[in-house]
Every structure is written in C-alpha cells, then in structure tokens.
Amino acid sequence: MSVPSVPAPDSRLPRHVAIIMDGNGRWAKQRYLPRPAGHRAGVGAVRTTVEQCIAIGVEVLSLFAFSSENWRRPEQEVTLLMELFIASLERETQKLHKNGVRMRIIGDRTRFAPVLREKIDAAEALTAGNQGLTLVIAANYGGRWDITEATRRIAADIERGALRSADITAGLIETHLALADLPEPDLFIRTGGEQRISNFMLWQLAYTELYFTPLLWPDFDEQAFRDALDSFAGRQRRFGFTGEQVENQKNR
C-alpha cells in the first residue's frame, strides 16, 4: 500500500478518528448498480483513509463496518458483506502489516462463521506488535452491547467477591470496554448525510467532536478527509471548562 505525502492541517491533529461509513447502497443506486457494487467501492475509500492517517500521524482510526443491527438487512446483502470482510482481510492484512498498522476487530464474534473468526484472529496476531496506526474495525458491534458486556464482567467480579458495588466508578467501567487501552475518539465523522451516531461507541463519544458530511462513503476522498480535519482544528474543545480557562491554560 503506497502512502502519499500529505501535509498536516495548520492546527493540531486528532489522535483518534472514528468513522461511520454510510452511503454505499445509495452510491450504487445513484449509478443504477446493485448495492454490492457500492460496498466494493467503499473498500477503496477505506484504503485511502487509512493511507491518509498513516501519512499525517493519526494514532487510531476506528471504522464502523457492520453494526449489531445490520443483521436485519436482506440476507443476500449480509452474506455479501461477510464475504467482502473475509476477502478484505485476505487481501489487505499483509499490506497493512508492512506499513506498521496494528489491526483490532471489536464486537461480538460469536455470530461469525468459523472461517471469518480465523481470519480475524490471524490478522490481529500478525499485526499485534506493530507500532504505527491502530486500525479498529467494529464488526457486529454496538455501543449498547459494549456497555452491557462491560457491566456483565463487572457483575461477575462482584459475584466472586473480587469487587464491591461501591467500587464501581466511571473509570472502572472504562477499563472493561472494548477500547479500554486506546484514547477516546477526538473526531467522529459520518458520511451519507445522516446526523446521528447510530449506537456507535456510545460511551467513548461523550466529548468527541462530531462532523457530518453529505458525501456518500465511496466519494469520501483525500480532500473530504482534509476538510473534516480542518473543521476539527478550528474548534475549541472545552471538556466542561469555559473558553477563557482553556485559553489561559494554552497560554501558560
């Protein structure tokens, strides 16, 4: 995978970018193509975005590939998405590895076919020691599922006497979430014109800057990503403080 040389925006970069890649089906429909053509075209946008993140130094890129609600889609489309997931892992993992990318797949894997679970395990094992971009693929993932699983693990610790209910804090819950070892997203991007987070990283997006674009995911190119980064760079992140407090802290 070739990584273009792209200058960073004038201001700071997000450490962690999270994206809902929406609009593949509509992209295909606009071109009188079957929906699978849109999903295949979307893989190219994934590749471009990964290359951009590597080039400019983003630490973590999280992509919402398949939600826990997507099983409701037509069976033929779900089958195609699973096949595309397997093919992408087979085709891209070695390239990602050569570029120092560490792969993480989060979500409930129990519903996946054994061959897909094997591909996921192999991709994670191969890239586990890499020190570059961490690429998180959320597959059969939902924010409510993530919080429910964390709660279940905490309850199990209480049942066996390792914890008391009084020990439960926001920090403790965070340590049991899927991305406990990674920084929370600084920038959330959703393509396709919808303006909602759709059960994606409900806990982690609490203070994330949100960016929505009408562009359909296959059309999300280098300039579109730069536009999102420039929007982020122009915002003041306050985390509950006043603007004056933030400016005073910066000027110290």
Image (tube, rainbow, N blue to C red):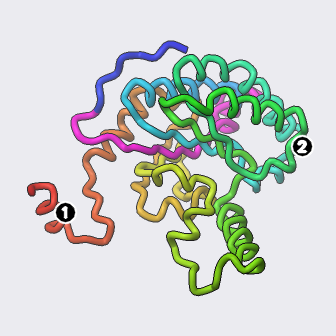
- What amino acid is found at the position of numbered circle 2 in the picture? Glu
Other-residue count near label 1 (Cα within 10 Å), few / some / many at <14 / 14–19 / ≥20 = some
In primary-sequence order, the first of circles 2 and 1 is 2
Q: Is residue 142 above or below residue 133?
A: below
User: Most extreme residue toward the front, as rendered?
Assistant: 161
The location of residue 105, given as percent across then percent down, is 68, 42
Residue for badge 2: 75
Q: Residue at x 27, y 53 (%)?
A: 235
Residue in the foreground of this view, choosing between 21 and 100: 100
- What amino acid is found at the position of numbered circle 1 in the picture? Val
In the image, is residue 163 part of the stretch drawn in magenta?
Answer: no
Marking on residue 168:
none
Q: Residue at x 36, y 28 (%)?
A: 56
Q: Is residue 184 left or right of residue 147?
A: left
Residue for badge 1: 246
The location of residue 230, given as percent across then percent down, is 30, 40
Q: Nearer the viewer, mark 2 or mark 1?
A: 1
Q: Residue at x 49, y 40 (%)?
A: 60
In the image, is residue 19 part of the stretch drawn in magenta?
Answer: yes
Whether residue 234 can be seen here = yes
Residue in the foreground of this view, choosing between 104 and 91: 104
Residue 91 image-quadrant placement: top right
